[in-house]
Image: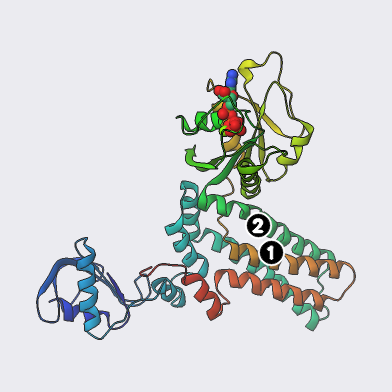
Amino acid sequence: VRISGERTAGIIGKITSLSSFEPHKQVLSLVRDPSGAIIDQVMVVFHPGPYSYTGEDLAEISCHGNPLIVDKIMDAIRQTGLARMAEKGEFSRRAFLNGKMDLLQAEAVGALIGSGTQAGFEAAQAMLRGKLSGRINALSEKIAVLLADLEASFITEDADIRDDTILSAVDDIIREIGMLLKGASYASVLRNGVTTTIAGLPNVGKSSLFNAILGYPRAIVHHEEGTTRDVLRERLGINGIDFLFHDTAGIRDTSSGPEMIGVEKTIESLRKSDLVLYVADAREGLKTEEMQWLTLCEKTIVVMNKTDLLEGRIREVPGWKTIPVSAKFHQGIDGLFTLMRETFPQDHRALLLERHAYLLGNALNDLINGREAFAAGLTADMLALDLQNALSNMRRITGQDFDEDILERIFSSFCIGK
Ligand SMILES: Nc1nc2c(ncn2[C@@H]2O[C@H](COP(=O)(O)OP(=O)(O)OP(=O)(O)O)[C@@H](O)[C@H]2O)c(=O)[nH]1
Ligand SMILES: [Mg+2]
């Protein structure tokens, strides 16, 4: 149970027998309700502001792990009349408002709690330590310096700042923001794992591949076409990245009834995926009409299956990563794993949430617009205006500029007590 604010010490004094505290040191105490009845034996630690998470006086009570005890302690605190329940994310919100962390770091707390994968966890950790804040602040600083130089040149006409110097400085910043944004598409991957769909024509061995990947017979495999109708999902970590596999119904143009519904689900699944394993029978290769299924997802690997039945060489599909396997005999699966892992390189560690990507995108557009107009001969004060806009977008990312709305949106997604 956490309490934050100037009345914290008073509240602790009322519900325990403690009256003075050694900062940051846990002490044993009893907690009593207003009638004096003992609720629990607890550990209490007091962090005087500003040396606490929120920057205010803050106490933490560790009780025995029973929700009933927690409720009774909460009640005892409420009945002192000195505290109310915290709102969602209010501790982190106060930490932000008291300058203990910037907005990015507050969001990192949320991302850390919500991260479902090892890579997502590490990215959120880096964000919490201020890695992204550092990059954003450095970029903001560059824009601010350029803006100052530009504005100085309006006043003192002899402060000569050459056009090509300005353009190359703007280009630098544009390039850096572009690089940051490139990492953005990985944010959902880091949070949820790589959504991977196994698709292909009926009977090519999709379910067999699904089973071979998982290492146990999860899906029904049958020599008849149209075996799989519903989408089956399973999660598997491969070298530090979580993949969420979907086995789907075979794609077929002429299907009707329940099978057609299955095909629609498959197409939907392809569109939403981060990665597609498109399975084909190695003996047949890929048919022309199948090419349309390869482009529904940004990343697709063509898996040539049933190589054990193949005489001769597999037919590569130009322009696509192709890998031979035999799902039935578990051959080539390791090679497939390596290829999948390479498709999601680890060096894109910066975790950008949608809000950051949006604001970075705005800043990028401001800079590109300004640069183009300036290169086309418009005056420098127009460029200065665009730089100001870009700067304000950047500052909103870290929360140097903020409004109530955005705080509300960010912290309301937190749980109570964070
Ligand atoms: N020889 C050989 N047979 C395979 C291989 N992979 C799958 N099969 C066989 O191909 C048939 C179809 O396999 P499934 O895994 O059910 O194929 P599917 O693509 O899921 O089929 P649908 O769900 O009906 O679209 C079964 O008889 C499998 O045993 C393989 O690598 N080698
Ligand atoms: Mg199947």
Snapshot quadrant of residue 299: top right
> Does residue 326 appear anywhere in the picture?
no
For the view shown, which residue lies furthest in the bottom direction?
81
Q: Residue 255's spot in the image, x, y percent?
A: 68, 39
Q: Nearer the viewer, residue 71 or 250?
A: 250
Q: Residues within 10 Å of mark 1 (few under 14, many from 20)?
A: some
Question: How far is the residue under mark 1 from the one under mark 2?
Answer: 8 Å
Q: Residue 270's spot in the image, x, y percent?
A: 64, 45
Q: Residues within 10 Å of mark 2 (few under 14, many from 20)?
A: many
Where disc 2 sits, the SS reads: helix
Q: Residue 75's spot in the image, x, y percent?
A: 22, 77
Relative to 58, say whether 122 is above or below.
above
* Lateral position of residue 26 relative to residue 234, left or right: left
Name the residue carrying label 2: 181
* Lateral position of residue 182 relative to residue 346, left or right: right
For the view shown, which residue lies furthest in the front direction?
257
Label 1, ligand 1: CB separation under 8 Å: no
Q: In terms of sequence position, does the residue under pointer 1 or pointer 2 come before the other?
A: 2
Tell me if label 1 and label 2 are in contact, CB under 8 Å: yes
Name the residue carrying label 1: 361
Relative to 217, say whether 33 is above or below.
below
Quarter of the image containing the C terminus? bottom left
* Lateral position of residue 17 relative to residue 278, left or right: left
Q: Nearer the viewer, residue 161 or 183?
A: 183
For the view shown, which residue lies furthest in the right direction?
377
Q: Amino acid at mark 2?
A: Leu
How is the protein colored in the picture?
Answer: rainbow
Snapshot quadrant of residue 377: bottom right
